[in-house]
Amino acid sequence: MIRYEDLNDISDGKLYSESDVVPIGTNGCAGCSYCCRSDMGHSIVLNPYDIYELTKATGKSFDELLVAFIIEISIIDTVALPHLKMDEGCKFLKNDRCSIHTNRPGICRLFPLGRIYDKDDFSYFIQTTECPCENKTPVKISDWLGIAELDKNTEFIKKWHRFLRFEQKKVSTIREMSGYEVNRIQGMDEEELEIYAGIIGEEDDYKNAKENYRVSKVQELQDECDEAVKEVMKSCISILFMNPYDTEADFYEQFDIRLKRCISVMRQIN
C-alpha cells in the first residue's frame, strides 16, 4: 500500500525475487531492537493472514486485540485497515526481543525488505536507509521470510493487493457518483429544482422547504455517500478481520470463502 516517489532514494535500485540471495542478514538483530522500539505510526499495516497469526500467538480475537490497544483501525490509502499500535513501540517487544517472532506480521518479516507492485505481481527491494545494522550478511529471501507454504502466501498477497485496489475503486466510485449528483442539483435553477423534486416524489418537501430544499438535499446526498463508504469499510473489516478464523484450519481456504462473500456484499452497496 505504501508508495515511493523514487525507489533509488531508499534502495540499491534493484528488484529481487524470493529465490534471490541478498545482503539483509542482521545476525538475529542481536543487541538491537531499534525498529520495534520506534514510533512507527501506522506503518505496520496488517492483512487477514497477520491477524490469523496474531490470534495463534496470543489466543486473542481481533476484538480483544483492539480492546487491549495492541492494534487499531485507521484509514490508510482511502480504506479502513488494522495496524499495530506503535506510538510507544511494539507491544510484543519483551526484553528487547520479539515475543511472537514465529507469528510476527508480514511487514516485520520483510524488514529491511519492502515490496513493490506491478499490476498483479510484486518484487522485493532492499530498504538501504532504514535498518541501522552494519555488515549485513547474504540471505536467500525465501529463508529470510520464513513462511510455511510460501507459494500459497505469495498468491494470497497478490489477491489481497488486488482486493485493496477493488475496495479503493468502490469507495472512489461512490464518492464520484455522489459528487456528480450534488453538482447537478447545485447547478439547477429553481424551476428545474422544483421539477426534479416532483420527479423523485418530494414536491411537498420542496414547497415546504422553499430555499432550504437545495441545501438539505445536497446534505442528504453527502450523508448517504458517507454512510455508503462506511458500509463498505465496515463490511470489509467485519468479514475479513473481525469474524474469528479457525487457527486449526487452513487459512487460505477460509480467506478465499470470505473474500468472495465480501466482494458480493460490496457490490450491493451503492
Image (spheres, rainbow, N blue to C red):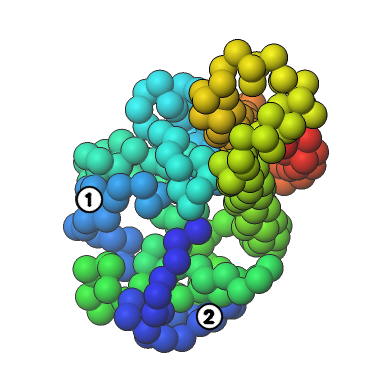
In terms of image quadrants, where is residue 84? top left
Instruction: Report the label total.
Output: 2
Q: Locate residue 96, reporting x and y percent.
A: 23, 46
In terms of image quadrants, where is residue 67? top left
Q: Locate residue 173, reporting x and y percent.
A: 66, 49
Could you tell me which quadrant the C terminus lies in?
top right
* Residue lying farthest to the front in this orientation: 191
Q: Secondary structure at mark 2?
A: loop
Residue at image position (77%, 40%) is 267
Q: Is residue 246 above or below residue 43?
A: above
Q: Is residue 232 left or right of residue 42?
A: right
Q: Secondary structure at mark 1?
A: loop
- Tell which of 113 and 134 is nearer to you: 113
Q: Which residue is mark 2?
A: 16
Q: Locate residue 136, reporting x and y percent.
A: 31, 76
Q: Is residue 66 left or right of residue 152?
A: left
- Tell which of 135 and 157 is nearer to you: 157
Q: Which residue is mark 1?
A: 38
Residue at image position (29%, 50%) is 40
Label 1 and label 2: CA atoms lie apart by 27 Å
Residue at image position (62%, 42%) is 188
